[in-house]
Amino acid sequence: MTTILRFFLIFIIPFSTLGCKEKKVDYFKYEEIDSEKVCALKPKQINEADSTSMFDSSFKTINGKFNEKISSIIYEQSLENLSIKKNKYIFCISKKTLDEGFLESQIRVEIKKGSYLRQYEFVNYLCLKNGNIKNYVDIDQVKEKCI
């Protein structure tokens, strides 16, 4: 076996698996604040992280249409809140900005903890009805209860 091949087998292959990104899907909850605002609670994975990066979000209504307005409203606030460990929320938004009914929310973020880097997608299915909110983890359940 040549020296280059040995070097490749011994050093390059094992180190190429270090720092690999793993993707994981989990859920987050919204919390109602003073009957005017809805805030996305930071999941424990974010609170326990050394750092976060690559933040992205998307919001869909019951008919599958994306609501880019919400994403643009919460973006800067989310970046700031993600960097503040003591902050309990990723973002807060006025209920007036949200349409009555169903909202599917997805928050994507990379979380670094030690030498481990993991991509998370946090999902929530929210029902806003008569000014009240209810969190769901199952899309079929929210469609059944909210429509």
Image (spheres, helix red, strand yellow):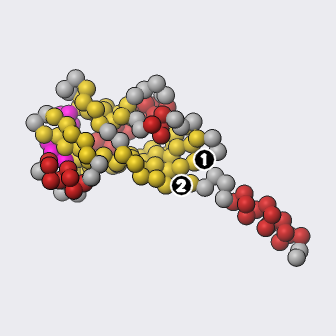
Picture coordinates of residue 101, whole percent (x, y): 15, 45
- Give amino acid for label 1: Tyr
Disc 1 secondary structure class: strand
Does residue 24 show up magenta in the picture?
no
Instruction: Indicate left or right for 43 with 52 as reference.
Output: left
Picture coordinates of residue 104, whole percent (x, y): 27, 49
As drawn, 65 above or below 36: below
Nearest the viewer among 42 and 44 is 44
Instruction: Residue 97: name its quadrant.
Output: top left
Q: How many dots with numbers?
A: 2
- Give amino acid for label 2: Glu
As drawn, 87 above or below 126: above
Picture coordinates of residue 72, whole percent (x, y): 33, 41
Q: Which numbered circle lies on residue 116?
A: 1
Q: State the residue at coordinates (67%, 54%).
A: 18
Instruction: Indicate left or right for 141 with 46 as reference.
Output: left
Q: What residue span does the magenta drawing correspond to?
A: 95-102
Mark 2 and 1 residues: CB-CB less than 8 Å, in contact?
A: yes
Which residue is under mark 2? 22
Q: In this orientation, does residue 8 appear?
A: yes
Q: State the residue at coordinates (52%, 43%).
A: 111
Of the numbered discs 2 and 1, the one sitting upstream in the chain is 2
Disc 2 secondary structure class: strand
Q: State the residue at coordinates (15%, 53%).
A: 144
Q: Which numbered circle lies on residue 142?
A: none
> Which residue is most to the bottom?
1
Does residue 97 show up magenta in the picture?
yes
